[in-house]
Amino acid sequence: MYAVPTTGIHTLLPPIVRLHEQPADVQVAPALSFPQHVTVAQTLDALHAMQHSIECIYYLFITDPDEHLVGVISLRDLLFATPQTRLYEIMDQQTVSLAADASLEEQAHVMSSTGLLALPVVDERGRLVGAMDATDMIARLEQRTTAAFCEVAGVSQHETEATPPLTAAVPRLLGQAASLLGVLLVAWAVLHSAPLTAAGTAAGALLIGIALLRQAGLVARQTATLTLRRLALGTLHPSRPAQVWATVGYELRLALLIGAVAAVAVAGLFAGSIGAQLSALLGATVFASIILSSVLGVLLPVLARQGQVDLRRVPVESVSLLSDMCGILLILSVVGIVLAS
C-alpha cells in the first residue's frame, strides 16, 4: 500500500505516479497509484526515486485514466516480473476495497475478514480516494472507543492530570446535571405533598439521601473510568506511590468542586421543607459521599492492578456499588440523628 502522510509530496513524485487525496469528509490517508499501462521497469524506477518519501509499501494500487481502481500488485509480484511487462498484465483484478462512506465498524469488519494489512478506499464511483492500513484502523477504533467510553461516564476524553480542576469539573458537572436536577425536583415534590411531621421529616431526609446517592455513584463512575484509562495507557503506575497520590489529590480537588455544588443545591432547595439545620446536614453528607466516591474511584482500580487483576475484570459498576454502600451508611446515620433529636 502507498499511504502518504507527508506534506509537499506533490513536488517529489515521478511523472507516472498519481496522488489520490481524500475529500474533506473522508478520514483516510492519501494514496499513490500507478497507471495500468506503465512497465515494471518504469514502476521500479519511480519507487527508487521515492524511497526517502514513502514510509511503507504493501501493495501497489493500479488505476485507469479516470482514476478508477482496477487492480493491485504485490511487491513480490512486481520484483519477479520482467522489466518490460505492463502492470495490467500482472495485476490482480479481484480487489477488495473499503467504501469511503462506510462506517468505521464496517471498514474494520472488512479488513479483519480479509486478513490484509492494508486496503484501498474508493468512492461510490469506484475511484481511488485514499488508503487504510491496520495501524490507522486500530488508532481510529481506539479513538472511537475512548470517546464513547468517556461520553457514557460523562467526562472529557481530553482530560489529563494537567487539566485545571475547574476546567475538568465543568464537563463532569454537565454529565451529572440532568440526574442531579431530576432527583432534587422529585424529592422536593414529595416533601411538599405531605404534612411536615418528625417522622415525615426523617423519611424525607432518607428519601433525599437515597436519591442523591446517585450523584456520588456518578462521581465514582467518572473517577474510575479515567483511572482505568490512565492505567491502561500507562500514564499511571501503581508501583509509584507519588504518582498515585498525585492522582488522588487531583481527583479530590475535582470532588471538592462538584461536592460543593451538590451540597449547596441540597441545602438551599430543602431548607424550607426539612429545616435549615437538617438540610445543611444532608448537604454535608452528600459532600462527604462525593469525596469518598472520588477516593474509591482511584484507589480500587489501582489496588486491582497492584494485585495483578485484569482491568477488564474490574467493572466501573463495582466501584459505583461500593460507593453507594458507603453512602447508604452515611445517610442512615443522618436519619438516626434526626430521629434521636
Image (cartoon, grey):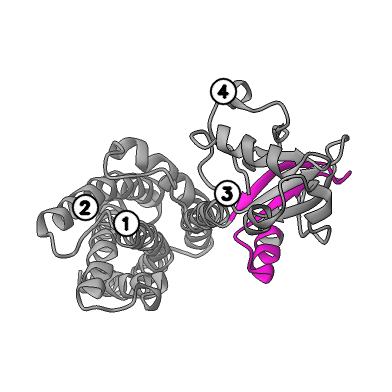
The residue where tag 1 is placed is 230
Q: Residue furthest left?
A: 242
Mark 3: few, some, or many residues within 10 Å (few <14, many ≥20)? few
Q: CA distance from mark 3 to mark 4?
A: 19 Å
Residue 233 x, y percent position in the rendering = 34, 57
Give me the disc on residue 8.
Answer: 4
Q: Could you tell me if the residues under marks 3 and 4 are in contact, i.e. CB atoms within 8 Å?
A: no
Q: Residue at x 55, y 26 (%)?
A: 7
Answer whether residue 162 is magenta in the image: no
Q: Residue at x 66, y 63 (%)?
A: 111
Q: Residue at x 54, y 61 (%)?
A: 193
The answer to whether any part of residue 130 appears in the image is yes
Q: Nearer the viewer, mark 1 or mark 4?
A: 4
Q: Nearer the viewer, mark 3 or mark 2?
A: 3
The answer to whether any part of residue 103 appears in the image is no
Give me the disc on residue 283.
Answer: none
Q: Could you tell me if the residues under marks 1 and 4 are in contact, i.e. CB atoms within 8 Å?
A: no
Mark 1 / mark 4, whichever is N-terminal: 4
Which residue type carries mark 2? Thr
SS category of the residue bearing label 3: loop
Mark 3 / mark 4, whichever is N-terminal: 4
> Magenta span covers which residues?
107-133
Give me the disc on residue 247.
Answer: 2
Which residue type carries mark 4? Gly
The residue where tag 3 is placed is 57
